[in-house]
Image (spheres, rainbow, N blue to C red):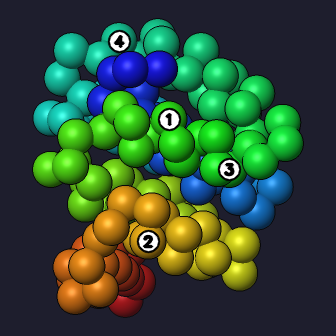
């Protein structure tokens, strides 16, 4: 994987798979994000299943999370790292429940992508606001 858009897909798939339960709402959120966000302009949504499979295959091997994150960091421009973190949060928020595994992965992502704590808090607050119920 060398494309930044595929790297963003890997982040979302990794996030969804982190608790060993890729829910329908998480998968639907990933599909919607790929179709509508400007960062995915030029990405063929038909490539989503292939990118998802490739990411899942990497996760199955030894040190799978580290291997996926190494590929993500190599393919992702620095200016899109906060975007990657925001997309991970969208996937976590999609089913309304943040598991301990997902929260741990968000912490790993924050450190791996070198997201400043204040920026991370702002991104987290934005995701929380978007998914708030009355």
Cα distance, mark 3 to mark 1? 10 Å
The earlier-in-sequence mark between 2 and 3 is: 3
**Picture coordinates of residue 42, whole percent (x, y):** 21, 15
Label 2 SS: helix
Q: Which residue is mark 3?
A: 65
What is the crowding at mark 3: few (fewer than 14 residues within 10 Å), some, or many (at least 20)? some
Q: Is residue 81 left or right of residue 14?
A: left
Q: Which residue is mark 1?
A: 71
Q: Nearer the viewer, residue 53 or 96?
A: 53
Write the residue at 25% across / 29% down. Answer: 40
Q: CA distance from mark 4 to mark 2?
A: 30 Å
The Cα atoms of the two marked residues, 4 and 1, are separated by 20 Å
Q: Position of residue 100 (x, y in %)?
A: 71, 81
Would you say the residues marked 4 and 2 are in contact, meaning their CB atoms lie under 8 Å apart? Answer: no
- For the residues marked 3 and 4, what is the alpha-carbon distance in whole angstroms? 25 Å
Report the quarter where the C terminus lies.
Answer: bottom left
Mark 2 Cα-neighbour bin, 10 Å: few <14, some 14–19, many ≥20 = few
Query: In x, y percent, where is residue 91?
Result: 50, 57
Which of the two discs, 4 and 2, sits closer to the camera? Answer: 2
**Residue indicated by mark 2:** 111
Q: In 3D space, how far apart are the residues under numbered discs 2 and 3 (Cα atoms)?
A: 14 Å
Residue holding disc 4: 44
User: Quick one: 99 or 62, which is closer to the camera?
Assistant: 62
Quarter of the rendering containing residue 128: bottom left
């Amino acid at each position: 994987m060398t494309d930044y858009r595929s790297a963003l897909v890997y982040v979302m798939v990794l996030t969804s798979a982190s608790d060993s339960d890729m829910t329908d709402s998480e998968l639907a959120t990933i599909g919607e994000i790929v179709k509508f966000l400007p960062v995915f302009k030029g990405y063929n949504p038909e490539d989503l299943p292939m990118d998802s499979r490739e990411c899942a295959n990497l996760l199955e091997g030894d040190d799978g999370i580290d291997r996926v994150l190494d590929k993500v960091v190599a393919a992702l421009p620095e200016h899109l790292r906060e975007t990657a973190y925001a997309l991970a949060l969208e996937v976590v928020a999609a089913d309304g429940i943040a598991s301990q595994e997902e929260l741990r992965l968000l912490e790993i992502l924050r450190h791996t992508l070198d997201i400043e704590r204040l920026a991370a808090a702002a991104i987290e607050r934005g995701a929380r606001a978007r998914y708030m119920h009355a």
